[in-house]
Image (cartoon, rainbow, N blue to C red):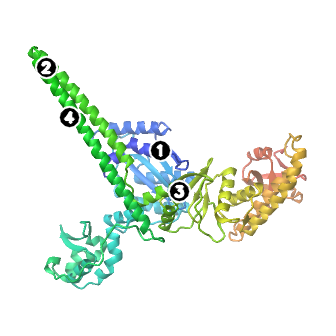
Amino acid sequence: MKSVKKSDCSSLVKYLADNQAKQSRIAYTSVINCQSIDLQGAVIEMMAIQGMNTRTEADKTYHLIVSFRPGERPEDSVIKAIESEICKGLGYGEHQRVSVAHDDTDNFHLHMAINKIHPVRLTIHNPYNDYKTLAKLCGALELQFGLEFDNHLAARVESENRAQDMEHHAGVESLLGWIKRECLAQLLLANSWAQIHGVLQTHNLVLVERGNGLVICDQAGLMVKASSVSRALSKTKLVERFGEYKSESNLIKLRESIKHYEARPMRSGMDTTLLYERYKNEQQRISHNRGSEWQVLRAKRERSLTGVKRAGQLKRSSVKLLGSSRTEKKCLYALISRDVKSEFNRINEQYRRERERLVKKYQPLQWADWLRQGATSGDPEALKALRARKVSHECKGNTLSAKSGGKLKWIGGKLIQESVTKKGTIIYHIGTSSVRDDGDSLKVSRGATEEGLKAALLLAIDRYGTQITVNGSADFKIQIVTVAAKAKLQLTFIDSGLEQQRKALVKQEKPEENESKTTDKSNKGPISSDKLEKHGFATADLYINEREHKRLTLPDIKKHRRYTEADNGLVTFMGVRNVAGESLALLERNEVILVMPIDQKTVNSLSRLAIGEAVTCTGRGIVKTKGKSR
């Protein structure tokens, strides 16, 4: 940070820990090398250590953000490993740090507030060329954890990066970007200073000397370095080609300007002319109202200060008329001055608070932020404009979409809308589950509850109709099929395998309802073998079908089939899987995985076994381990 105040440890952690009334914002927290595990306690410790180093005047907090590619959301264990490796690589392995991951934007990202003061030596550590170190670390971590590859070393100068940031975050075209898109090709083909100036004249731009180089200016005084537009346009390169620099005043004006730069929205798949006019009018109105109220506020403060000064002067005049001694008058004057200063401080403090309220009330917004605010309020045009400017990425994770991949209609009120990102992704939440609507599909959060999955399916039916495509992990597909069958939703899965499993579960649900009406009230004991088979083998078939489907592309996966009574005898225990609320034991024999539904008592018994340990199955299909049967 160029400003030390921006990276103040206390305010930084306060920002990181603020959920901003969003359930999905804070996804991960950790405190390392502190006695306290609480964030606020860790901040107190870090500030105490920083206070012990009184020599350095540099920033004492290292604020690092690790951002992942769109759609990537690593497991918490992977995040912890990445955090540790990066800090060790930077030389901060022994330093105190607070880490918080945010998941309320289009890119999942991890903030790290690292104390640059060593907790024992009390010396400050500033990594040398840290951007190069970070580039190497990120490349290695991508390979280690199978993350999507990204570009870590910038090939642009600082001004180019700032222009790109403006276009990406504000959504408004920068002068540098406009020059590159409108006249760079013509500038590179120019054969003289006259042609260079002529091309710039047609775009209402001028090329002038500044310092040891050249800058390109527009009619409003904005300027960019010519070398930032292209290295071929640097002063050294141009002097080598055309000789000594000649200014525009020494040349004949070739033509009138036919184009000019104006801050406009970036080009996208939607015409935003009318929407941008609304934005400018609203910003002008905000600016006018803020100026008017600010003027009233300043006038009010001046009147209050003038009144206090006048009252103080009257009091001093009264003291002069008193027949008091010199010492008494000095005491009275001192009391009057103290009262006047106290009133001044009170008035100025009140003015400061009113001014902060005014700035917050009439805060100007960038184009992208204005669109996001409108989309959050339910403006369909603003939402459409946000989604039109995003770069298309294949949505990863557990998703629901339409057969044709059609766009979503704007509807609201089904789930609780939490926020809208700058790419037009609407984040809903229901209970502890969240659903992300990016315009092409619905992404369901990991570990979603049955209530959340049902809500996501209902929303998908509302958006796409009854033909639904399901992508994601095997467990997610099984959970979706189970919830759809249990809730008796009128839908069809495009995947024929999932649709067959849904139909099979629907058929099994019907006789189960009739049976439960007559027998479940009196059945207070454990689940019978018949009922376990009815519930468990349906789930086992879902799991087996999914594994067999994957085995077509991944030959390392062993063949899976249902356990039968013919499989009595010695088998190898390969673990327990929990699928859609049902527990399944995996047993191996002759390179084939046998899938057996089991109850909770058997799960507790098998939890004491190691993977690969031999177990015995009896003729009744009960697993017998170490002399005790379950």
Q: What residue does disc 1 label?
A: 18
In which image quadrant can residue 186 be found?
bottom left
Q: Compare marks 4 and 2 and give the one earlier in the sequence.
A: 4
Q: From the viewer's perspective, is 256 left or right of 555?
A: left
Q: What residue does disc 2 label?
A: 319
Q: From the viewer's perspective, is 393 left or right of 589?
A: left
Report the Cα–Cα distance between label 4 and label 1: 42 Å
Task: Give the residue type at disc 3.
Answer: Gly
**Does residue 417 lie above or below 315 as drawn?**
below
**Foreground of the two, 441 or 562:** 441
Task: Give the residue type at disc 2.
Answer: Val
Task: Give the residue type at disc 1.
Answer: Asp
Callout 3 touching callout 4 (CB < 8 Å): no
Q: Compare marks 1 and 2 and give the one earlier in the sequence.
A: 1
Report the Cα–Cα distance between label 1 and label 2: 55 Å
Q: From the viewer's perspective, is 361 left or right of 454?
A: left
Callout 1 touching callout 2 (CB < 8 Å): no
Report the Cα–Cα distance between label 3 and label 4: 48 Å
Kindly identify the residue that appears in the image at 25 percent across and 34 percent down: 304
Q: Compare marks 3 and 1 and give the one earlier in the sequence.
A: 1
Report the Cα–Cα distance between label 4 and label 2: 20 Å
Mark 1 surroundings: few (<14), some (14-19) or many (≥20) residues within 10 A: few
Residue 314 horizontal/vertical position (percent): 16, 25
Q: What residue does disc 3 label?
A: 378
Give SS at disc 2.
helix
**Foreground of the two, 514 or 623:** 514
Q: Compare marks 4 and 1 and give the one earlier in the sequence.
A: 1
